[in-house]
Amino acid sequence: MAQDGLEHGSGGGRGAGASRVYVCPPRDQMLLMPVSMRDWLDEDHLAWFVIDVVAEMDTRGLHVRPGGAPGRPPYCPEMMCALLLYSYCCGVRSSRRIEAGCRTDAALRVICGGLEPDHATIARFAADQAGALAALFVAGLRLCAAAGLADLSVVALDGTKMAADAAIDQNRGAAWIGREVDKLLAATAAGEQSVQPRLDGQGAPAQPRGPRRLGRLRAALAVIEAEEAAETAAAAKKAEAAMEGARRGRKPLGRPPKDPAAALAYTRAEHHAALARAQAKQQRRARKVAAADAAGRRLGGFAPGPDRALANAQVALEAAERAAEQAEPAAGPQVNITDPDSRIMKTQKGWLQGYNAQAIVNKHHIVLACEAYQDAGDVLLYEPMTAVLDAALTAAGITGAVGLKLADAGYWSDENATAAGPDRLIATTKDHKRRRAARELGQATGPPPEDACPADAMEHRLRTTEGAAAYAQRGHTVEPVFGNTKHNRGMRGFRRRGLPAAKDEWAFINLAGNMLKLRQYRASTASTATLAPTAA
């Protein structure tokens, strides 16, 4: 609708003249939007794609309601799933922002068909159906395989740190948590005693103060007790192994630990090893003397003096015993009282309270397997992620074997290098050290030597032309997936607490990423088919 004769003024644009014609918004016009919602969005809009892929998935798990079916009829699970999946694809996870979008965003209005679920309903659906939503990762992987995107020739494994819904300064020890539990229990008991009976003889039941906080504190205390028991068992096992070697005269490996109790066990093993070596030396001397006496000759040389190594070990043992007696009790492990399952992780930007989110990605940037762990390091997660990959491929019906598996230096160990599974290239050092070693040692050719240890054999393979070219694929295979998730879609942490919730959300996050790749692939193949010349 055009409006004529609007005066422009002397400050108008060049060559505009005294007046200009404008196109004004017809806000009073009836039926400003098309009557049918099918006409609200373009045919290739992401919302239509999400609706279609949800219809292709097996969503029977979403129809199981944990609490039965009380109250009003629920919203259609497929609609709620499409609503969440579209929002995750767009980087929106806040239930309040999704609720607002259902009123103002045309795409969300199309997905919901004009319905407006409130934020509490959206949040409850995401929490109650978290397991069923995470199970759709396999359904999405099956769709990617049908499109030819589940390539297994080269896959890359890596991890990224995802923040938990908890502050890093909320880590506490067992003593502090025990005092807080006692305070809450005392407050609860005082509240129950203060209930006065009504005239009809019935008293109003007192509700405990902070039941959720009390549950979290008890869960945190249980985590600490489990960690202390595991640490005690590991220390006892290590001390027993060191003492067993010391009985045969072998010194314990590594440096003495800083903890006084552990240092005392280490020093005792050293003392036993020195004593065993001294006794063995005396026995050898006694046998030589006996042989000389039997031959009727005198044994030459000087008689051995005091064993200096045994004397030094004795002095070190006495010092370690004094240090252990004078040392203050150890502070013990700490755990986060907001999310006891989360752990403190080291990142490039500092320390983070969160989880270690792992993913295995192929060359099409399709996440084939994903899982969240509490381990701060990656070295112990190589074999578990291999098992997760096998389970995901089996569940999705993807046959075939992985050709080559790539991993950075965080996964290096002799056990990972020689474990069962597909062929692999694992960096033994950081990339800049590996490139420097390649420049200094030169290019390698052929297979590694037969007598080479696992590290030398892997370094030899990485210095060959084929190995270097294959390993170079790792960075542009898995890193863009994490960059898209954390930078483009803004998902740097988890919204719900606990390791099971983190696992479920990480699977749904990667499902959304896979669906974006599938949409991009389908659009490219459709455009290629359109541009292809038709047969005469």
Image (tube, rainbow, N blue to C red):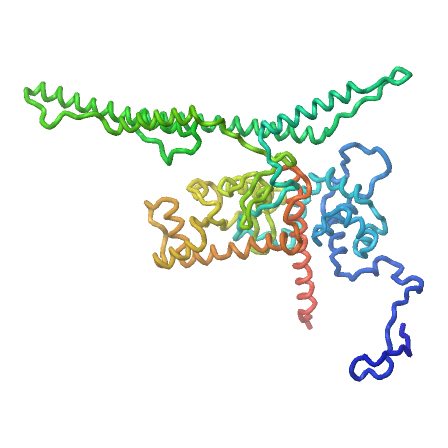
Asked whether the viewer can see residue 56, the reply is no
Q: Position of residue 218 (x, y in %)?
A: 64, 27
Residue located farthest toward the front when viewing the structure as drawn: 326
Q: Is residue 131 above or below residue 110?
A: above
Disc count in the image? 0
Q: Position of residue 204 (x, y in %)?
A: 84, 21
- Pick the residue in front: 327 or 317: 327
Horizontal side, residue 195 vs residue 167: left or right:
right
Q: Is residue 12 left or right of residue 482?
A: right
The C terminus, quarter of image: bottom right
Residue nearer the viewer, 267 or 148 = 267
Examine the image and state in which quarter residue 343 appears: top right
Decide if residue 477 is in sight here. Answer: yes
Percent from the top left, x then y, of residue 126?
73, 42
Dividing the picture into quadrants, the one containing residue 532 is bottom right
Residue 451 found in image quarter: top left
Q: Is residue 29 above or below residue 387?
A: below
Nearer to me, 485 or 359 = 485
Q: Residue at x 63, y 55 (%)?
A: 487
Picture coordinates of residue 7, whole percent (x, y): 88, 78
Question: At 82% across and 50% down in the image, what residue appears?
Answer: 112
Q: Residue furthest left?
A: 296
